[in-house]
Amino acid sequence: MERLETGIHSGRLSTAEYETNFSDLHPRLDKHEALVAADRCYFCYDAPCMTACPTSIDIPLFIRQIATGNPIGSAKTIFDQNILGGMCARVCPTEELCEQACVRNTAEEKPVEIGRLQRYATDTAIQAGKQFYERAASTGKKIAVVGAGPAGLAAAHRLAVKGHDVAIYDSKSKSGGLNEYGIATYKAVDDFAQKEVDYVLSIGGIEVRHGQQLGRDIQLADLQSKYDAVFLGIGLAGVNALRVDGENLPGVDDAVDFIAALRQATNKADVAIGRRVVVIGGGMTAIDAAVQAKLLGAEEVTICYRRGKEHMNASEFEQDLATSKGVIIRHWLAPKSILSQDGKVAAIEVEYTKLANGRLVTTGETGVIAADQIFKAIGQTLETSGLGSLRMESGRIAVDGEGRTSLDGVWAGGDCVFGGDDLTVSAVAQGRDAAESINRTLAAGAQPAVAVA
Protein backbone atom coordinates (compact mmCIF):
# COMPACT_ATOMS: atom_id res chain seq x y z
CA MET A 1 0.00 0.00 0.00
CA GLU A 2 1.33 3.43 -0.94
CA ARG A 3 1.95 5.53 2.15
CA LEU A 4 0.53 9.02 2.19
CA GLU A 5 2.62 12.03 3.11
CA THR A 6 3.06 12.37 6.86
CA GLY A 7 1.91 15.42 8.79
CA ILE A 8 -1.03 17.68 8.01
CA HIS A 9 -1.28 18.47 4.31
CA SER A 10 -3.81 19.54 1.69
CA GLY A 11 -4.28 18.05 -1.76
CA ARG A 12 -3.97 14.40 -0.75
CA LEU A 13 -6.39 13.24 -3.47
CA SER A 14 -7.17 13.89 -7.11
CA THR A 15 -9.95 16.28 -8.16
CA ALA A 16 -12.10 13.35 -9.25
CA GLU A 17 -11.67 11.63 -5.88
CA TYR A 18 -12.75 14.74 -3.98
CA GLU A 19 -15.83 15.07 -6.19
CA THR A 20 -16.78 11.44 -5.67
CA ASN A 21 -16.10 11.45 -1.93
CA PHE A 22 -18.18 14.57 -1.26
CA SER A 23 -21.10 13.79 -3.54
CA ASP A 24 -24.64 13.59 -2.16
CA LEU A 25 -24.93 10.88 0.51
CA HIS A 26 -28.57 10.13 -0.39
CA PRO A 27 -29.35 11.54 -3.85
CA ARG A 28 -32.83 12.89 -4.39
CA LEU A 29 -35.43 10.39 -5.60
CA ASP A 30 -36.69 10.87 -9.14
CA LYS A 31 -40.43 10.92 -9.86
CA HIS A 32 -40.73 7.20 -10.48
CA GLU A 33 -38.68 6.29 -7.40
CA ALA A 34 -40.79 8.63 -5.28
CA LEU A 35 -44.04 7.07 -6.50
CA VAL A 36 -42.73 3.56 -5.78
CA ALA A 37 -41.52 4.58 -2.31
CA ALA A 38 -44.80 6.35 -1.51
CA ASP A 39 -46.79 3.29 -2.56
CA ARG A 40 -45.30 1.36 0.36
CA CYS A 41 -47.02 3.59 2.93
CA TYR A 42 -50.05 2.13 4.71
CA PHE A 43 -51.38 5.68 5.45
CA CYS A 44 -51.99 4.62 9.02
CA TYR A 45 -54.66 6.24 11.16
CA ASP A 46 -52.97 7.73 14.25
CA ALA A 47 -49.69 7.01 12.47
CA PRO A 48 -46.79 6.29 14.86
CA CYS A 49 -44.37 8.00 12.45
CA MET A 50 -46.23 11.28 12.91
CA THR A 51 -46.07 10.94 16.70
CA ALA A 52 -42.32 10.31 16.45
CA CYS A 53 -41.71 13.53 14.48
CA PRO A 54 -40.77 16.45 16.78
CA THR A 55 -42.53 18.87 14.40
CA SER A 56 -45.62 16.60 14.08
CA ILE A 57 -45.69 16.67 10.28
CA ASP A 58 -48.72 14.81 8.89
CA ILE A 59 -46.55 12.16 7.28
CA PRO A 60 -49.32 9.91 5.88
CA LEU A 61 -50.93 12.94 4.23
CA PHE A 62 -47.77 14.25 2.58
CA ILE A 63 -46.88 10.78 1.31
CA ARG A 64 -50.40 10.28 -0.06
CA GLN A 65 -50.06 13.60 -1.88
CA ILE A 66 -46.84 12.38 -3.49
CA ALA A 67 -48.54 9.11 -4.42
CA THR A 68 -51.31 11.02 -6.17
CA GLY A 69 -48.89 13.16 -8.18
CA ASN A 70 -49.07 16.29 -6.02
CA PRO A 71 -45.55 16.95 -4.66
CA ILE A 72 -46.23 20.69 -4.38
CA GLY A 73 -49.21 20.06 -2.11
CA SER A 74 -47.06 17.58 -0.20
CA ALA A 75 -44.45 20.28 0.37
CA LYS A 76 -47.06 22.61 1.84
CA THR A 77 -48.16 19.91 4.27
CA ILE A 78 -44.54 19.62 5.38
CA PHE A 79 -43.81 23.36 5.52
CA ASP A 80 -46.96 24.08 7.53
CA GLN A 81 -45.26 22.28 10.41
CA ASN A 82 -41.59 22.57 9.51
CA ILE A 83 -40.47 25.44 7.30
CA LEU A 84 -36.95 23.95 7.24
CA GLY A 85 -38.27 20.60 6.09
CA GLY A 86 -35.78 20.44 3.24
CA MET A 87 -32.71 20.38 5.46
CA CYS A 88 -34.40 18.20 8.06
CA ALA A 89 -35.06 15.65 5.31
CA ARG A 90 -31.30 15.53 4.78
CA VAL A 91 -29.94 15.58 8.33
CA CYS A 92 -32.63 14.22 10.67
CA PRO A 93 -31.85 10.85 12.24
CA THR A 94 -34.99 9.42 10.62
CA GLU A 95 -33.77 5.94 11.44
CA GLU A 96 -34.33 6.79 15.12
CA LEU A 97 -37.47 8.92 14.71
CA CYS A 98 -40.19 8.54 12.08
CA GLU A 99 -38.73 5.62 10.16
CA GLN A 100 -38.03 3.65 13.31
CA ALA A 101 -41.72 3.99 14.21
CA CYS A 102 -42.90 2.91 10.73
CA VAL A 103 -45.14 -0.17 10.90
CA ARG A 104 -43.43 -1.55 7.79
CA ASN A 105 -40.55 -2.48 10.09
CA THR A 106 -42.67 -5.18 11.74
CA ALA A 107 -43.37 -7.19 8.60
CA GLU A 108 -40.43 -6.31 6.36
CA GLU A 109 -37.77 -4.74 8.60
CA LYS A 110 -37.61 -1.96 6.04
CA PRO A 111 -39.48 1.29 6.74
CA VAL A 112 -41.00 3.65 4.22
CA GLU A 113 -38.27 6.07 3.12
CA ILE A 114 -39.92 9.02 4.82
CA GLY A 115 -36.85 11.26 4.82
CA ARG A 116 -36.15 10.84 1.13
CA LEU A 117 -39.81 11.36 0.27
CA GLN A 118 -39.81 14.55 2.32
CA ARG A 119 -36.77 15.74 0.43
CA TYR A 120 -38.43 14.94 -2.91
CA ALA A 121 -41.44 17.10 -2.05
CA THR A 122 -39.62 20.03 -0.49
CA ASP A 123 -36.95 20.16 -3.19
CA THR A 124 -39.68 20.23 -5.83
CA ALA A 125 -41.34 23.24 -4.21
CA ILE A 126 -38.14 25.18 -3.50
CA GLN A 127 -36.78 24.65 -7.01
CA ALA A 128 -40.11 25.83 -8.43
CA GLY A 129 -39.97 28.93 -6.23
CA LYS A 130 -43.39 28.07 -4.84
CA GLN A 131 -44.21 30.41 -1.95
CA PHE A 132 -47.16 29.11 0.07
CA TYR A 133 -47.49 31.93 2.59
CA GLU A 134 -48.46 35.58 2.56
CA ARG A 135 -47.80 38.03 5.34
CA ALA A 136 -50.78 39.13 7.38
CA ALA A 137 -51.52 42.84 7.71
CA SER A 138 -48.81 44.63 9.67
CA THR A 139 -49.24 44.49 13.42
CA GLY A 140 -46.75 47.28 14.03
CA LYS A 141 -44.89 44.99 16.42
CA LYS A 142 -41.15 44.41 16.21
CA ILE A 143 -39.39 41.27 17.36
CA ALA A 144 -35.65 40.63 17.69
CA VAL A 145 -34.38 37.14 16.97
CA VAL A 146 -30.83 36.36 18.08
CA GLY A 147 -29.36 33.57 16.01
CA ALA A 148 -30.03 32.71 12.36
CA GLY A 149 -29.94 28.96 12.91
CA PRO A 150 -32.87 26.53 12.65
CA ALA A 151 -34.67 27.78 15.77
CA GLY A 152 -34.23 31.45 14.89
CA LEU A 153 -35.24 31.03 11.25
CA ALA A 154 -38.32 29.01 12.15
CA ALA A 155 -39.38 31.61 14.72
CA ALA A 156 -38.71 34.51 12.36
CA HIS A 157 -40.70 32.97 9.53
CA ARG A 158 -43.73 32.20 11.67
CA LEU A 159 -43.66 35.70 13.21
CA ALA A 160 -43.33 37.34 9.77
CA VAL A 161 -46.31 35.37 8.50
CA LYS A 162 -48.30 36.76 11.43
CA GLY A 163 -47.51 40.31 10.26
CA HIS A 164 -44.76 41.20 12.71
CA ASP A 165 -41.50 42.87 11.67
CA VAL A 166 -38.48 40.72 12.55
CA ALA A 167 -34.81 41.60 12.86
CA ILE A 168 -32.40 38.65 13.10
CA TYR A 169 -29.00 39.23 14.68
CA ASP A 170 -26.30 36.65 13.96
CA SER A 171 -22.58 36.56 14.70
CA LYS A 172 -21.62 34.78 11.48
CA SER A 173 -21.28 36.20 7.98
CA LYS A 174 -23.93 33.81 6.62
CA SER A 175 -27.28 32.66 7.96
CA GLY A 176 -28.17 29.05 8.67
CA GLY A 177 -26.42 28.24 11.93
CA LEU A 178 -25.44 24.58 12.17
CA ASN A 179 -27.17 23.89 8.86
CA GLU A 180 -24.57 26.11 7.20
CA TYR A 181 -21.55 25.57 9.45
CA GLY A 182 -22.02 22.32 11.35
CA ILE A 183 -23.35 19.66 8.98
CA ALA A 184 -21.15 17.22 7.07
CA THR A 185 -20.64 18.49 3.53
CA TYR A 186 -21.88 15.32 1.86
CA LYS A 187 -25.25 15.63 3.65
CA ALA A 188 -26.14 19.00 2.10
CA VAL A 189 -24.48 19.55 -1.26
CA ASP A 190 -25.05 22.30 -3.85
CA ASP A 191 -25.18 25.05 -1.23
CA PHE A 192 -28.64 23.87 -0.20
CA ALA A 193 -28.46 25.48 3.26
CA GLN A 194 -28.34 28.95 1.69
CA LYS A 195 -31.05 28.09 -0.83
CA GLU A 196 -33.31 27.14 2.06
CA VAL A 197 -32.43 30.34 3.96
CA ASP A 198 -33.35 32.37 0.88
CA TYR A 199 -36.64 30.49 0.63
CA VAL A 200 -37.47 31.15 4.28
CA LEU A 201 -36.62 34.85 4.02
CA SER A 202 -38.60 35.30 0.81
CA ILE A 203 -41.78 35.73 2.89
CA GLY A 204 -40.58 39.29 3.57
CA GLY A 205 -40.63 41.26 6.78
CA ILE A 206 -37.36 39.74 8.00
CA GLU A 207 -34.11 41.70 8.13
CA VAL A 208 -30.89 39.83 8.88
CA ARG A 209 -27.97 41.64 10.49
CA HIS A 210 -24.78 39.60 10.29
CA GLY A 211 -21.63 40.08 12.38
CA GLN A 212 -23.68 40.90 15.47
CA GLN A 213 -22.65 38.86 18.50
CA LEU A 214 -24.61 38.87 21.72
CA GLY A 215 -22.47 40.25 24.53
CA ARG A 216 -20.08 41.95 22.14
CA ASP A 217 -22.13 43.97 19.65
CA ILE A 218 -25.58 43.70 21.17
CA GLN A 219 -26.91 43.28 24.71
CA LEU A 220 -30.09 41.53 25.73
CA ALA A 221 -31.21 44.48 27.85
CA ASP A 222 -30.91 46.80 24.85
CA LEU A 223 -32.96 44.45 22.69
CA GLN A 224 -35.64 44.27 25.37
CA SER A 225 -35.91 48.05 25.37
CA LYS A 226 -36.11 48.39 21.58
CA TYR A 227 -38.35 45.47 20.65
CA ASP A 228 -41.75 44.16 21.69
CA ALA A 229 -40.31 40.67 22.18
CA VAL A 230 -36.99 38.82 21.90
CA PHE A 231 -36.33 35.25 20.84
CA LEU A 232 -32.96 33.65 21.63
CA GLY A 233 -31.81 30.89 19.30
CA ILE A 234 -28.10 31.27 19.96
CA GLY A 235 -27.08 27.61 19.91
CA LEU A 236 -23.92 26.40 21.63
CA ALA A 237 -20.79 28.30 20.64
CA GLY A 238 -18.34 27.02 23.25
CA VAL A 239 -16.36 23.78 22.94
CA ASN A 240 -15.48 21.55 25.87
CA ALA A 241 -11.79 21.05 26.58
CA LEU A 242 -10.00 17.73 26.96
CA ARG A 243 -8.06 19.04 29.97
CA VAL A 244 -5.00 16.90 29.27
CA ASP A 245 -1.34 17.75 28.74
CA GLY A 246 -0.54 18.70 25.15
CA GLU A 247 -4.01 19.95 24.29
CA ASN A 248 -2.64 23.23 22.92
CA LEU A 249 -0.15 21.63 20.54
CA PRO A 250 -0.37 22.44 16.81
CA GLY A 251 -2.52 19.72 15.27
CA VAL A 252 -5.09 19.58 18.10
CA ASP A 253 -8.25 21.20 16.74
CA ASP A 254 -11.94 21.55 17.51
CA ALA A 255 -14.02 19.24 15.34
CA VAL A 256 -16.72 21.89 14.92
CA ASP A 257 -14.17 24.34 13.48
CA PHE A 258 -12.89 21.67 11.10
CA ILE A 259 -16.41 20.87 9.88
CA ALA A 260 -17.20 24.56 9.44
CA ALA A 261 -13.99 25.20 7.49
CA LEU A 262 -14.70 22.27 5.20
CA ARG A 263 -18.28 23.44 4.64
CA GLN A 264 -17.06 26.89 3.58
CA ALA A 265 -14.18 25.68 1.40
CA THR A 266 -14.77 26.25 -2.31
CA ASN A 267 -12.14 23.64 -3.10
CA LYS A 268 -11.89 20.57 -0.87
CA ALA A 269 -8.29 20.07 -2.00
CA ASP A 270 -7.35 23.21 -0.08
CA VAL A 271 -8.38 21.68 3.27
CA ALA A 272 -5.40 20.12 5.05
CA ILE A 273 -5.75 16.82 6.88
CA GLY A 274 -3.37 14.52 8.74
CA ARG A 275 -2.25 11.08 7.63
CA ARG A 276 -3.24 9.61 10.98
CA VAL A 277 -6.23 11.29 12.60
CA VAL A 278 -7.79 10.63 16.00
CA VAL A 279 -11.22 12.00 16.93
CA ILE A 280 -12.23 12.14 20.60
CA GLY A 281 -15.98 11.82 21.18
CA GLY A 282 -19.04 9.71 20.46
CA GLY A 283 -21.66 12.02 19.00
CA MET A 284 -22.67 13.21 15.54
CA THR A 285 -19.89 15.80 15.45
CA ALA A 286 -17.31 13.09 16.05
CA ILE A 287 -18.75 10.93 13.28
CA ASP A 288 -18.96 13.83 10.81
CA ALA A 289 -15.37 14.89 11.53
CA ALA A 290 -14.03 11.36 11.27
CA VAL A 291 -15.82 10.47 8.05
CA GLN A 292 -14.80 13.70 6.38
CA ALA A 293 -11.18 13.28 7.49
CA LYS A 294 -11.23 9.93 5.71
CA LEU A 295 -12.87 11.44 2.62
CA LEU A 296 -10.15 14.11 2.51
CA GLY A 297 -7.51 11.41 2.21
CA ALA A 298 -6.42 10.55 5.75
CA GLU A 299 -4.91 7.09 5.76
CA GLU A 300 -5.96 6.12 9.29
CA VAL A 301 -8.86 7.64 11.21
CA THR A 302 -9.76 6.44 14.68
CA ILE A 303 -12.63 7.53 16.92
CA CYS A 304 -11.93 7.07 20.63
CA TYR A 305 -14.95 7.02 22.92
CA ARG A 306 -14.82 6.65 26.68
CA ARG A 307 -17.88 4.38 26.92
CA GLY A 308 -19.37 1.50 24.93
CA LYS A 309 -21.01 1.39 21.51
CA GLU A 310 -24.47 1.36 23.09
CA HIS A 311 -23.74 4.64 24.89
CA MET A 312 -22.72 6.65 21.82
CA ASN A 313 -24.97 9.60 20.99
CA ALA A 314 -24.37 9.03 17.28
CA SER A 315 -27.03 6.80 15.76
CA GLU A 316 -26.23 3.24 14.77
CA PHE A 317 -26.71 4.25 11.14
CA GLU A 318 -24.06 6.96 11.50
CA GLN A 319 -21.69 4.59 13.27
CA ASP A 320 -22.11 2.06 10.46
CA LEU A 321 -21.57 4.81 7.89
CA ALA A 322 -18.28 5.71 9.56
CA THR A 323 -17.00 2.14 9.63
CA SER A 324 -18.08 1.64 5.99
CA LYS A 325 -15.78 4.54 5.08
CA GLY A 326 -12.85 2.92 6.88
CA VAL A 327 -13.09 4.73 10.21
CA ILE A 328 -12.05 2.66 13.23
CA ILE A 329 -14.24 3.16 16.31
CA ARG A 330 -12.61 2.18 19.59
CA HIS A 331 -14.61 2.14 22.81
CA TRP A 332 -13.73 2.35 26.49
CA LEU A 333 -10.82 4.73 25.94
CA ALA A 334 -10.26 8.13 27.56
CA PRO A 335 -7.56 10.65 26.56
CA LYS A 336 -4.71 10.82 29.06
CA SER A 337 -2.15 13.04 27.32
CA ILE A 338 -1.11 14.22 23.88
CA LEU A 339 2.45 13.40 22.94
CA SER A 340 4.61 15.59 20.72
CA GLN A 341 7.67 15.43 18.52
CA ASP A 342 9.40 18.54 17.19
CA GLY A 343 6.66 20.64 18.77
CA LYS A 344 3.84 18.92 16.89
CA VAL A 345 1.35 16.19 17.66
CA ALA A 346 2.88 12.73 17.36
CA ALA A 347 0.47 10.49 19.29
CA ILE A 348 -2.22 10.37 21.93
CA GLU A 349 -1.90 8.41 25.12
CA VAL A 350 -5.19 6.83 26.16
CA GLU A 351 -6.35 5.05 29.27
CA TYR A 352 -8.81 2.18 29.30
CA THR A 353 -12.10 2.71 31.11
CA LYS A 354 -14.91 0.59 32.53
CA LEU A 355 -18.14 0.92 34.47
CA ALA A 356 -17.92 0.12 38.16
CA ASN A 357 -21.09 0.39 40.23
CA GLY A 358 -22.61 2.54 37.51
CA ARG A 359 -19.69 4.96 37.41
CA LEU A 360 -17.09 5.37 34.69
CA VAL A 361 -13.60 4.73 36.03
CA THR A 362 -10.16 4.24 34.51
CA THR A 363 -8.43 0.87 34.83
CA GLY A 364 -4.82 2.08 34.96
CA GLU A 365 -4.00 0.39 31.66
CA THR A 366 -2.74 2.75 29.00
CA GLY A 367 -1.91 2.67 25.31
CA VAL A 368 -0.61 4.98 22.61
CA ILE A 369 -2.19 5.73 19.23
CA ALA A 370 0.02 7.38 16.63
CA ALA A 371 -1.52 10.59 15.27
CA ASP A 372 -0.48 13.80 13.58
CA GLN A 373 -3.91 15.43 14.00
CA ILE A 374 -6.46 15.21 16.80
CA PHE A 375 -10.02 16.54 16.74
CA LYS A 376 -11.95 17.31 19.92
CA ALA A 377 -15.65 16.46 19.70
CA ILE A 378 -16.69 16.07 23.32
CA GLY A 379 -19.60 18.45 23.41
CA GLN A 380 -20.36 22.15 23.22
CA THR A 381 -21.33 24.70 25.84
CA LEU A 382 -23.46 27.81 26.00
CA GLU A 383 -21.68 31.16 25.84
CA THR A 384 -23.51 33.19 28.48
CA SER A 385 -22.04 36.60 27.68
CA GLY A 386 -24.79 39.16 27.17
CA LEU A 387 -27.57 37.05 28.71
CA GLY A 388 -27.83 39.15 31.85
CA SER A 389 -29.88 37.66 34.67
CA LEU A 390 -31.58 34.91 32.66
CA ARG A 391 -32.22 31.85 34.80
CA MET A 392 -30.04 28.92 33.78
CA GLU A 393 -30.38 25.22 34.38
CA SER A 394 -27.49 22.77 33.90
CA GLY A 395 -25.61 25.34 31.85
CA ARG A 396 -28.46 26.17 29.48
CA ILE A 397 -31.37 28.62 29.42
CA ALA A 398 -34.37 27.55 31.49
CA VAL A 399 -37.70 27.82 29.65
CA ASP A 400 -41.29 26.72 30.13
CA GLY A 401 -43.38 24.66 27.71
CA GLU A 402 -43.87 27.64 25.40
CA GLY A 403 -40.22 28.69 25.36
CA ARG A 404 -40.66 31.62 27.77
CA THR A 405 -37.63 32.45 29.89
CA SER A 406 -37.39 34.01 33.34
CA LEU A 407 -37.29 37.51 31.81
CA ASP A 408 -40.37 39.37 30.63
CA GLY A 409 -40.69 39.43 26.87
CA VAL A 410 -37.85 36.97 26.23
CA TRP A 411 -38.29 33.51 24.72
CA ALA A 412 -35.66 30.94 23.74
CA GLY A 413 -35.37 27.69 21.80
CA GLY A 414 -32.97 25.26 20.16
CA ASP A 415 -29.72 23.88 21.52
CA CYS A 416 -29.29 26.78 23.96
CA VAL A 417 -32.28 25.75 26.13
CA PHE A 418 -32.35 23.14 28.86
CA GLY A 419 -34.06 19.86 28.03
CA GLY A 420 -33.41 19.83 24.29
CA ASP A 421 -32.03 16.93 22.29
CA ASP A 422 -29.69 18.91 20.02
CA LEU A 423 -31.57 18.01 16.83
CA THR A 424 -32.29 20.39 13.97
CA VAL A 425 -35.91 19.25 13.80
CA SER A 426 -36.43 19.88 17.53
CA ALA A 427 -34.92 23.35 17.23
CA VAL A 428 -37.36 24.12 14.42
CA ALA A 429 -40.27 22.94 16.54
CA GLN A 430 -39.18 25.07 19.50
CA GLY A 431 -38.69 28.16 17.34
CA ARG A 432 -42.09 27.68 15.72
CA ASP A 433 -43.89 27.13 19.02
CA ALA A 434 -42.17 30.09 20.70
CA ALA A 435 -43.29 32.28 17.79
CA GLU A 436 -46.87 31.20 18.34
CA SER A 437 -46.54 32.04 22.04
CA ILE A 438 -45.06 35.45 21.21
CA ASN A 439 -47.87 36.14 18.78
CA ARG A 440 -50.54 35.20 21.30
CA THR A 441 -48.93 37.39 23.94
CA LEU A 442 -48.64 40.41 21.65
CA ALA A 443 -52.17 39.93 20.32
CA ALA A 444 -53.49 39.95 23.87
CA GLY A 445 -51.83 43.32 24.39
CA ALA A 446 -50.46 42.30 27.76
CA GLN A 447 -46.96 42.00 29.09
CA PRO A 448 -45.98 38.34 29.42
CA ALA A 449 -45.75 36.98 32.91
CA VAL A 450 -42.43 35.70 34.15
CA ALA A 451 -42.70 32.07 33.13
CA VAL A 452 -39.74 30.44 34.84
CA ALA A 453 -39.28 31.12 38.51
Image (spheres, rainbow, N blue to C red):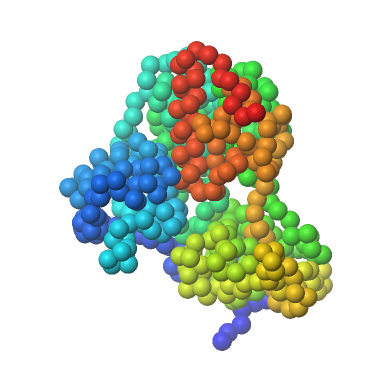
Left or right: where 92 falls relative to 326: left
Residue at x 37% of width, y 20% of height: 136
Closest to the observer: 265 or 291?
291
- Residue 449 place in picture, x, y as percent: 58, 20
Can you see residue 261? no
Q: Position of residue 334 (x, y in %)?
A: 71, 68
- Does 97 sit left or right of 180 as displayed? left
Q: Can residue 49 be spotted in the picture?
A: yes
Going by the image, does 306 lie left or right of 45? right
Q: Quadrant of residue 450?
A: top right
Q: Residue at x 70, y 69 (%)?
A: 356
Could you tell me which quadrant the N terminus lies in?
Answer: bottom right
Quarter holding the C terminus is top right
Q: Nearer the viewer, residue 86 or 172?
A: 86
Q: Which residue is pictured at 57% across the width and 75% down the height?
A: 328
Nearer to me, 24 or 10? 24
| Residue found at x 25% / y 47% | 45
